[in-house]
């Protein structure tokens, strides 16, 4: 376990998760309207896990798991989007969209934010969100990310180019302890 919250905990991917996780990664319809599609071969997926365990200094995946039964609810990821910036881009995904609106991703993002700032020297985290994705925009705002601007037609998704809103959170604005991460904004 990487970090534990009130409803969920974050952990790294295990070898026993791979078959199930690969199926989720390839289910294009379950991705929803706003999650980018990146297909990889099954062999490439397993090879990347063998090489990195899906966790290294410049990129990583953490599974969002239920405290109640340990089931996998979603995934958080970070990656170095710009080599010369002191930041990571963060993305998140809820595997069962029927669980939307229960605060799972908000809690996961607060925990992940705390974890990344506590672990790495990075100074800022970024979220890039298609403006029509109202749920993701609410998550960003609930977790203290600040709107910075829009990148026009920056992503190709489902046959069309889309604008992306850019949100960021600086180290100085982030919770410094786990208690802070789950504190004042933990209502969502």
Image (cartoon, rainbow, N blue to C red):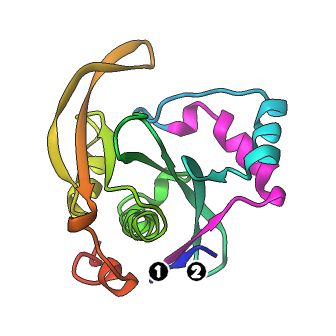
Look at the picture and state if 125 lies above or below 115.
Answer: above
> Residue at left 39%, top 62%?
109
Number of the label disc, if any, that sits on residue 16: none
Look at the picture and state if 169 lies above or below 148.
Answer: below
Q: Is residue 94 left or right of residue 186?
A: right
Residue 67 placement (x, y as % from top left): 58, 80
Q: Which residue is mark 1?
A: 5
For the residue pair 88 and 9, the one nearer the viewer reads as 88
Residue 153 placement (x, y as % from top left): 27, 17
For the N terminus, give its image quadrant.
bottom right
**Earlier sequence position, callout 2 versus callout 1:** 1
Look at the picture and state if 34 lies above or below 119.
Answer: above
User: Which stretch did the figure color magenta?
Assistant: 7-31
Q: Which residue is mark 2?
A: 67
Q: Residues within 10 Å of mark 1 (few under 14, many from 20)?
A: some
> Residue at left 39%, top 82%?
178
Q: Are marks 2 and 1 in contact (CB under 8 Å)?
A: yes
């Amino acid at each position: 376990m990487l970090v534990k919250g009130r409803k969920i905990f974050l952990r790294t991917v295990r070898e026993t998760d791979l078959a199930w996780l690969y199926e989720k990664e390839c289910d294009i319809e379950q991705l929803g309207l706003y999650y980018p599609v990146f297909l990889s071969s099954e062999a490439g997926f397993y090879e990347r896990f063998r090489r990195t365990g899906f966790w290294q200094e410049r990129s990583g995946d953490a599974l969002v798991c239920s405290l109640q039964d340990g089931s996998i609810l979603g995934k958080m990821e970070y990656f170095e989007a710009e080599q010369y910036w002191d930041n990571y881009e963060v993305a998140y995904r809820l595997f069962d969209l029927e669980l939307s609106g229960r605060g799972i991703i908000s809690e996961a993002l607060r925990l992940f934010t705390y974890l990344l700032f506590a672990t790495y020297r990075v100074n800022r985290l970024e979220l890039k969100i298609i403006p029509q994705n109202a749920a993701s925009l609410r998550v960003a705002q609930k977790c203290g990310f600040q709107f910075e601007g829009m990148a026009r037609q920056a992503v190709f998704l489902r046959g069309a180019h889309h604008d992306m809103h850019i949100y960021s959170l600086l180290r100085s604005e982030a919770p410094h302890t786990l208690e802070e991460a789950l504190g004042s904004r933990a209502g969502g």
